[in-house]
Amino acid sequence: MAQFLNTKETLVTDAIDGLLASSGGALTRLDGYPHIKVVYRSDWDKSKVALVSGGGSGHEPAHAGFVGKGMLTAAVCGEVFASPSVEAVLAGILAVTGEAGCLLIVKNYTGDRLNFGLAAERARALGRKVEMVVVDDDIALPDLPQPRGVAGTLFVHKIAGALAENGADLATVANAAKSVIEKVVSIGMSLDTCTVPGSPKEDRIAPGKAELGLGIHGEPGVQQVDFSSAVSAVNTVVEKLTRRVASGSGVALVNNLGSTTPLEMSVLTHALAETGIARHIIGPAPMMTSLDMHGFSVSILPVSQEELEALQEPVGLAAWPGVNAIEPVNVAPLPDGLTPIAPIPSNNPKTKETIARLSELLIQAEKDLNELDAKSGDGDTGSTLATAARALQSGLDRMPLADLTQLFPALGNELSQTMGGSSGVILAIFFNAAGDACASGASIPKSLIEGLNRVSQVGGAKEGDRTMIDALAPALNALPSGLNQAAKAAREGADKTAKIHRAKAGRAAYVPEENLIGHNDPGAEAVALLFEGLAREIEG
Amino acid sequence: MAQFLNTKETLVTDAIDGLLASSGGALTRLDGYPHIKVVYRSDWDKSKVALVSGGGSGHEPAHAGFVGKGMLTAAVCGEVFASPSVEAVLAGILAVTGEAGCLLIVKNYTGDRLNFGLAAERARALGRKVEMVVVDDDIALPDLPQPRGVAGTLFVHKIAGALAENGADLATVANAAKSVIEKVVSIGMSLDTCTVPGSPKEDRIAPGKAELGLGIHGEPGVQQVDFSSAVSAVNTVVEKLTRRVASGSGVALVNNLGSTTPLEMSVLTHALAETGIARHIIGPAPMMTSLDMHGFSVSILPVSQEELEALQEPVGLAAWPGVNAIEPVNVAPLPDGLTPIAPIPSNNPKTKETIARLSELLIQAEKDLNELDAKSGDGDTGSTLATAARALQSGLDRMPLADLTQLFPALGNELSQTMGGSSGVILAIFFNAAGDACASGASIPKSLIEGLNRVSQVGGAKEGDRTMIDALAPALNALPSGLNQAAKAAREGADKTAKIHRAKAGRAAYVPEENLIGHNDPGAEAVALLFEGLAREIEG
């Protein structure tokens, strides 16, 4: 599978330099490429206990993404899934360790333990105070005396980081780290394996299955389980966790292992919140990933008040999502005003007659308009309008016919309900906006132009785009000169659409030019027919 | 492809409730499920201009993840890739709009424009002040008069959000939004399509190809281009962007479209920084995703000083990565002390003789130890030790033989270089820690026990785990009683390993029990041989 990298050899160094370039100068690296890849805080003055972590790459944002005030002082980065060398770790220690000493936070893998361990010895031989803790939070393999270090490591980074930032001494910071390590438990589940750069992707998880208890290096899970839903996945994970920690008291760290979408992570978080396993939550977010693995992990730390406060201390790191209390979902009642208030019916015989005749006119034009529409669309403009016209006719007695400021929005709401689709919404916007202007005291032509302006703004179409606006705009502009003028302008506008080779808005935008030439746009044609009818009706 | 969801129908509502449950009470939703999915700030008092955005889901964290002080007031969420209804948008507007009015920030899709547009009309009819802006930042299709709204929308959210939070009136906020929209440009590139829940995944991008100018709804890109590297991908994107904006002055928003790993995003960011197209950067981070699409987009906003400041105002949202200046990578020189200082050679004929004889002993035992190791490993313990012993013999003249505090670490460094692998590191840790203790004034037995403790701590093995510690620990404990006692204890310890059925540390942990029974652990056997030799040598 292709990936956004240059060469496998420069993948990690390119990525580190990208992180640094986008850090605003907050991060510095040692000049040891390609062998020594150490990232540390640019503002570090060695006056406090330094925290150094790291390990193989491929777990980003861990660890370099957590280097900053209140978390790590330095990260020592290996190649993808490979421990950094003793020299690299030693370089990291020596670069950041002052009188206050240094705590190494190491995940429990033999390579990391040995390389960080020997580097610590060599640093001690050079007079540095160095302590080392090993995180072993994975509970996937209950019988192994050497559980892996996974996402629970973040708890150690954050709590030790807060203490160190507040000036605690090395023993205090190391003891706090050890106390977290004794308590924290983690387990992961995945629907797919990860893609190691330069290696073919292993396809070992069958459809309908998930892996439970996987590591963060593409190792197979301890077992394959049936996968049916997010809720059952979370329940399985929670069942494993609650064998080791009491439910209801701790902090959950919900980690995206790579390519799980934010939607899925939120669905999982919802299910987790429902179980009541924890009172606070960190995430969901990618924190300790396994490249692009489609999975998640949950870590639980039963916390003391001091630990909770250390977790809650703000840090200015984009990768750290912060801690929130898990709360019942706040639900507020729907606001008033959603259902349009039915207008109070009123009568105006002339208005009623006019609407009825115009409706009849649209019903008569059904077949012609459908035929026109068939040239550029799905041939239903006539039917859509005729259906709306019939509904309008039968609903006339419910209309506020005597009051235009009410009639306009009532027409809009009626049309949006009976026409459906975009056309209904567009006409609803037209009549609502016209009613709004009318209620503000605008004249009828001005109100209608206001409606048109809004349709144009909202729908994005303007004259010349081969829509009904090509007839409606000239008609409304001519309206102050009388209905006959308006009808003439509408007709000219509609006929002009037959010469517009390329539709720029609406569905006809996707139709080849040759299908459009010589045929009026059906919407514009309908508008012309309406204005011509209106002129006959009123001007006689 | 399986996904972490319960049912397609509840995907979005489950996810919204997960977001709310993990928001610490900061977010509230309206009681309109499943039809009306509106998320808004719990602390909202309607005293300022409200910002409402939204659209189809599947773009998380947009838009609900950006609801909070200084950004959006409310998000109206549709189903995946489907516009929310007019009623849903209206509910959102009515829930948060007070006297100061409301700005709708809509991405340029017909459904969104129409539904948000009609909702705005209906809200106006109910007396609310509502303005609407339409974001059309996508430059993939230069000829279309209706460019799509993509990740550049985030600039509008943030800048309008900062103004609204600072008390600007609706016209000012709307004008600021329009000014951003006029300037912002975006384009995306992808190596794979997205997986729409409930639909089969389309496999339209051939190996070696990438899609340029794709949308955020799985629409095909405008063109398929050859994909060779991250640098060339970024250069292609930058070339398109610099047709529209001047290079070097703006802010780049680097968006992960879904499943691109943080490593890849950082590699792309490095390449982008190198082009000099922008002076500031937001991200890389997933902000406007397209489900799990393996791609990225770059948006550029040429900014005024006021806009930059609005972007930089802090917001307490985990989804917002903040703005940083793009800086040259800070590179610091490697610290001193990485290369072990060569010890000053000194002589002690007895020590020299002892080491030479013990080395000879290991060389003699090569074959036997290899045979033992073949039972539980790859049969090279004997050769590894013999090689190290030969190197030690030939390097004896370079050793500080007269000073144990120097000799111990020198032995450690020599062994770690000549043995390689875990064993070399373990012995280096042993001798370095012993030297450290010795330099602090500890007796020789105590120093060696200190070395053993450190090996045990770092390597994680203890007595009974079937490692060399099973011989070393009893030998060192017996050492105060003399070398003969130590040798006896080592031999007993080594022989006991033949009865340890299950190795708990080291490589033998992966070997079936039946292969281990009846054979001494080769490391423990080597230790026993050494102590027996030492006893003969010194005690006679």
Image (tube, coloured by chain):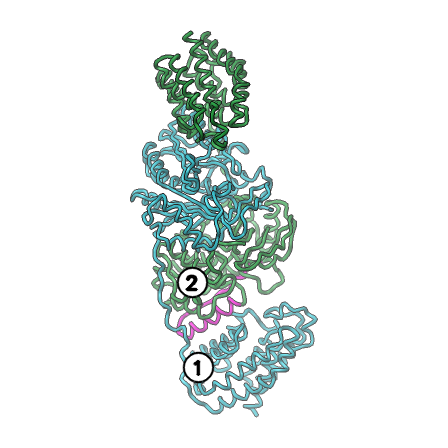
Chain colours: A green, B cyan
| Label 1 neighbour load within 10 Å: few <14, some 14-19, many 20+ | many
Residue A359 drawn above or below residue B140? above
| Camera-nearest residue between A187 and A24 | A24
Identify the secondary structure beneath mark 1.
helix
Q: Which residues are magenta?
A: A111-138
User: Label 2, on which residue?
Assistant: A51
Q: Quadrant of residue B13?
A: top right
Q: Quadrant of residue B244?
A: top left
Query: Residue A172 in the image: x percent, y percent?
Result: 43, 63
Are marks 1 and 2 in one subunit? no
Question: Numbered disc 2: what chain?
Answer: A
Real-space Cα separation, disc 1 to disc 2, in angstroms: 29 Å
Residue B234 drawn above or below residue B28? below
| Three-letter code for the amino acid on which mark 2 is drawn | Leu
Name of the residue lying farthest toward the left: B305
Query: Residue A473 in the image: x percent, y percent?
Result: 39, 22
Query: Residue A213 in the image: x percent, y percent?
Result: 60, 56
| Three-letter code for the amino acid on which mark 1 is drawn | Thr
Image marks 1 and 2: residues in contact by CB distance under 8 Å: no
| Camera-nearest residue between A495 and B424 | A495
What residue is at 57 percent from the left and 46 percent from the top? B203
User: Label 1, on which residue?
Assistant: B405
Q: Is residue A112 magenta?
A: yes
- Please give left or right for residue A461 compared with residue A181 in the image: left
| Camera-nearest residue between B247 and B412 | B247
Q: Is residue A499 magenta?
A: no
Question: Numbered disc 1: what chain?
Answer: B
Residue A483 drawn above or below residue B510? above
Which numbered disc covers residue B56?
A: none
Query: Residue A212 in the image: x percent, y percent?
Result: 61, 54
Identify the secondary structure beneath mark 2.
strand
